[in-house]
Amino acid sequence: MVLTTRSVSSFTRSEIADLFKRARVALRYTGIRFLKAKSILPQGRLLIVTPRACGNAPERNLIRRRVKDIFRTQNLGAFGFDIVMIVSKDGIATPFETLKTLLAQAVNPQP
């Protein structure tokens, strides 16, 4: 199955509510928190939360695009986990390579 950017991050409201109920903290980093839950679909998905307080629209969109690209190109959905990434003001300027490492650590099923 080829993941498109849309399918990587497409959730309904009820799926989001259910995901937050099931998700547990997987990883914390300065300004970024990763929550992880077993996916209800065969392929894992990604939900990115970037509140307005963490930066202007271009900054928020940049981190969203980067994380979605990492998730899709590294095929991290194959692990079967839904990931929630919550970004705060301190995490908005996280470099691409750091995001790549953090996302891989958050998705990895190993303890």
Image (cartoon, rainbow, N blue to C red):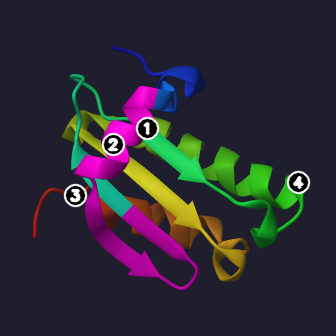
Q: Secondary structure at mark 4?
A: helix
Question: Residue 50, relative to residue 5: is it above or below?
Answer: below
Residue type, mark 2 in image: Leu
Seen in the image, is 9 located left or right of residue 15?
Answer: right
**Which numbered disc covers residue 108?**
3
Mark 3 vs mark 1: which is more N-terminal?
Answer: 1
Is residue 76 something that shows in the picture? no
The magenta-colored residue range is 14-34
Residue nearer the viewer, 18 or 102? 18
Q: Is residue 29 magenta?
A: yes
Residue type, mark 4 in image: Pro
| Distance from the alpha carbon under mark 4 to that under mark 2 | 27 Å
Residue type, mark 1 in image: Ile
Residue position marked by numbered label 1 in the rendering: 16
Q: Secondary structure at mark 3?
A: loop
| Distance from the alpha carbon under mark 2 to that under mark 3 | 18 Å
Residue type, mark 3 in image: Asn
Q: Residue 27: horizontal and vertical position, in percent?
A: 34, 73
